[in-house]
Image: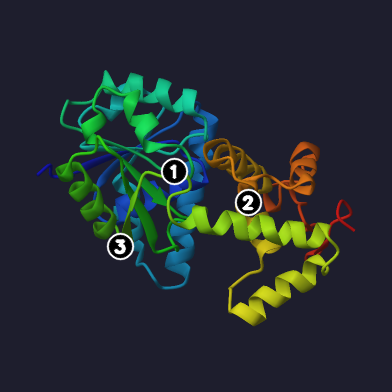
Amino acid sequence: MTEIRKVGVVGAGLMGSGIAQVSAAAGYDTVVREVEQGFLDRGMARIEKNLDRAVAKEKLGPGERDAIAGRLHPTVDLADLAGCDLVIEAITENLEAKHELFGAVGGVCEDDAVFASNTSSLSITELAAGTDRPDRFVGLHFFNPVPVMPLVEVVRCGQTSKETFDVAFAFAKSVGKSPIACGDNTGFVVNRLLVPYMLDAIRAYESGIASIPDIDKGLRLGCGYPMGPFTLGDFVGLDTLYHITEIMYNEYKEARFASPPLLRRMFLAGYHGRKTGKGFYDYSGPEPVVSDFVK
């Protein structure tokens, strides 16, 4: 079985930086690659902030923080991924971009290196088919925020070898996560069940059943969810949710996966949630209030 000693993470955004952080914290030398220095600097600053916060809360000692930081190797050079036993892709949710990336990485890494995608909705089979090693390709879907959320979906497609799946599953455990195994269906386990729930909440509001705050409150207090569907949508990003619905609807052609008109309008208007300051809620004040777009 392949032994994972060195990990490459491609993409230093919210997900990629989180994956790199937990990888380094678990003791792996971790190469973090971005296409531009500015993106890379922002990702590394995010990791540094997280580690400093952990020290302030006495969850880490200063020496542990420094050791984790020392295992992180930021770069804009794809060639620095050479020697990585596992390369995890965490770039934009675009099939062509991912195919292009894995094609380039395949020319850099050893033949026995395992490739993984953090995609939340694209087909692992389709991604694997665009590489030079479909038998050594697997899905590793982490959840946001990666340092906090305990779940990883380990996705095996028809080409994935048992050894590759076992290596990926063991890696997820080694970075302190609780992995679950799932087959290659669009949305995997969590989004397959979660996305229709979030879309139904939007349709309930469109139908005048209740206000946005009351639907959120109802699901929190009635079902014990930590946050309501609209708060969750803003946290995930309404642009991300919209793109996932497009992918899932194109795959299944079922009405429950189709984007409601309100979500599409908010996506087009740039109301993407917390990342833009406004989504279903407006975050510009001391407390979130319902945004002007949906009042």
Total numbered badges shown on the rendered structure? 3
Q: Which residue is mark 3?
A: 176
Instruction: Determine whether, in the image, residue 186 is placed left or right of residue 200.
Output: left
The amino acid sitting under disc 2 is Arg
Residue 144 visible to the viewer: no
The first of marks 3 and 2 along the sequence is: 3
- Binning the other alpha carbons within 10 Å of mark 1 as few (below 14), some (14 to 19) or many (20 upward) gives many
The amino acid sitting under disc 1 is Gly
Instruction: Determine whether, in the image, residue 274 is placed left or right of residue 145.
Output: right
The first of marks 3 and 1 along the sequence is: 1
Measured in 3D between alpha carbons, the distance from the residue under mark 3 to the one under mark 1, in whole angstroms, is: 16 Å
**Residue at the farthest front position:** 254
Disc assigned to residue 16: 1
Q: Which residue is mark 2?
A: 256
Q: Position of residue 288 (x, y in %)?
A: 78, 65
Residue 249 image-quadrant placement: top right
Image height check: is 169 above or below 41? below
Residue lying at 86% horizontally and 64% vertically, measured from the top left: 208
Residue lying at 19% horizontally and 47% vertically, measured from the top left: 167
- Binning the other alpha carbons within 10 Å of mark 2 as few (below 14), some (14 to 19) or many (20 upward) gives some
The amino acid sitting under disc 3 is Gly
Given residues 130 and 255, the one toward you in this image is 255
Locate the N terminus and report the quarter of the image it occupies. Answer: top left
